[in-house]
Image (tube, grey):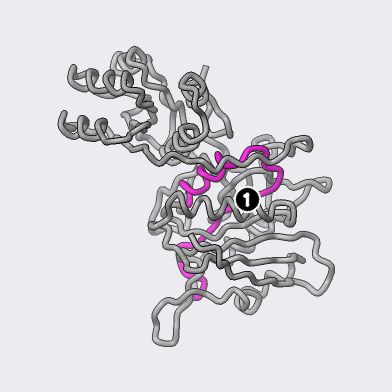
Amino acid sequence: MSKNYKVINIATSSEAPKSSILLIYTGGTFGMVYDEDGSLAPFNFSLVIEKIPELQSLDLKLTVISFPEPVDSSNVNTEHWHAMAEIIKSYYNQFDGFVILHGTDTMAYTASALSFMFRGLNKPVILTGAQIPIGATRSDARENLITALEIASKKNEGRPMVNEVALYFNYYLLKGNRSQKIRSSNFAAFESENYPYLAESGVEIVFNESFLKPHETQQRLEYYPKLDPNVVVLKIFPGITQEVVKSILNIKGLRGVVIESYGSGNMMTWEWMSNLLRDAVARGIFLYNVSQCMGGSVVQGRYETSKMLDDIGVISGHDITTEAALAKLMHLLGTEQNVDIIKQKLNIAIRGELTVLE
């Protein structure tokens, strides 16, 4: 995509800033205001202090980079993930932290993808957005932005408090690759069912320090830009037909399938289903089993209906989300060449995205 980014430098205080933050505006509901005729138009971020005067209390050196054209999050693809990642990589040494303004529909996908594209992050990358545009009276954009910036600038003994990709929304900071959008018409749009909140914003911001990724002084930032998009989600449901499953597993160029199974990893034991899955594995397609449930974990072999998957060679995703599973498959298939290493890494946590139950 075009690299003609719009760059705006904003001093939120006349005093020496305590931190420098790069704000990346990609699009979405957050940055929209109502025009004179009542229609929505992109917000001019040079006026952000005028719109949110509370920012002046943060004592930040704030730089805003906007995509040339705001992107509705429904249109976000791997090209936009690369654009965000390239900005972070290019400016990594110039800023103390990064905040990405993003549409809510695919925010959890982007948070997951960025978590895999970087290894050794020692600075915060916080995604946030809004359910109501910043120009609306009841908008949640103000609180989300103010707190995301405050979290991104928070330090502990001179080091960043947050050293990973995270998502802030409606008073809670979530681990990025553990988050999911679960509500479409509520300010509490996101949850992290299988991982505790990283922080909660109330009278004060309280960090759940035991679950934060520690700062690793000796770790250098590693960037993995290659993503293989030849993956698909196969959702299991009662009455699914052989023709549907066969057509999905025979997509030309397909390399990975996230299977959304029932409960703790269960699915039908019909002969035609097991034959199709076994054939896919034999053809080198990686089958990754995740649960349709928001909470809980896949435990293959607990019941007879999932033991068959173990025998076939389906890989357990444990308690990983569908969003993180897709991003992880894209990352590993784009980065690794060794089949055994891909299988091994799918089954363990490489960015804290899953928990293996003993």
Residue at 34% x, 12% y is 311
Q: Which residues are magenta?
A: 107-136
Name the residue nearer the viewer: 340 or 269.
340
Image-based side of 79 in relation to 44, left or right: left
Residue at 67% x, 49% y is 124
Whether residue 136 is visible, yes or no, is no
Query: Residue 276's x, y, as percent?
Result: 23, 22
Height in image: 108 above or below 285?
Answer: below
Secondary element under disc 1, as helix, strand or loop, is strand
Whether residue 288 is visible, yes or no, is yes
Q: Does the magenta portion include 154?
A: no
For residue 247, which quarter of the picture? top left
Residue at 70% x, 39% y is 209
Query: Residue 35's x, y, as percent?
Result: 45, 83
Query: Residue 281's x, y, as percent?
Result: 33, 21
For residue 279, which quarter of the picture? top left
Height in image: 61 above or below 286?
Answer: below
* Number of numbered labels in the structure image: 1
Image-based side of 228 in relation to 119, left or right: left
Residue at 46% x, 59% y is 103
Name the residue nearer the viewer: 125 or 212.
125
Please rate how many residues cluster around mark 1, counting C-alpha atoms within 10 Å: few if below 14, some from 14 to 19, many from 20: many
Query: Residue 184's x, y, as percent?
Result: 38, 56
Give, as a three-letter code, the residue at label 1. Answer: Val
Q: Does the magenta portion include 125?
A: yes
Image-based side of 322 in relation to 211, left or right: left
Q: Which residue carries the number 1 mark?
A: 125
